[in-house]
Image (cartoon, rainbow, N blue to C red):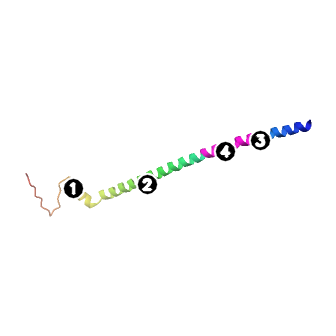
Amino acid sequence: MAKEKKKSKRALSGKVMAVVLTVFSVFVAVNLIWQLNTYAQLKVDKEKLEAEIAEENKKKQEYTNQMEYYTTDEYIEKIAREQLGLVMPDEIVFKINN
């Protein structure tokens, strides 16, 4: 009878161990799937942010180019002619009235 109790305890502990290992394996699998999903989402977010950064850098470069143009003599002369009506000293202005 003592042998039967030992065998039944071993069988019971083996079954408990199998259940524990199964539950642990399921937990690991679910956790792994969740981690992979999170990784994929973060990768997509990173790509979107990198695209936004590239676009903002492009806009920044355009603004820098505009700022450089606004400080050129060509732009200053254009504004002086168009908005202020100024002319160069050796130029003659003809105005035509309709």
Q: From the image, tell me which residue sits under label 2.
A: 54
In screen coordinates, is 49 left or right of 32?
A: left
Q: Tell me where residue 90 appears, x and y as whole percent.
A: 14, 64
Q: Is residue 90 magenta?
A: no
Between the C-alphas of marks 1 and 2, the distance is 36 Å
**Residue type, mark 1 in image:** Ala
Specify the quadrant of the image occupied by residue 63.
bottom left
Q: Which residue appears at 32% of the width and 56% of the height?
A: 66
- N-term mark: 4 or 2: 4
Identify the residue position indicated by label 3 in the image: 17
Please provide percent x and percent y for residue 53: 45, 52
The amino acid type of the residue labelled 3 equals: Met
Secondary structure under badge 3?
Answer: helix
Looking at the image, tell me whether mark 1 or mark 3 is earlier in sequence order: 3
- Res 24 label: none
Residue toward you, 28 or 61: 28
Q: Secondary structure at mark 4?
A: helix
- Between 31 and 25, the one lying in front of the other is 25
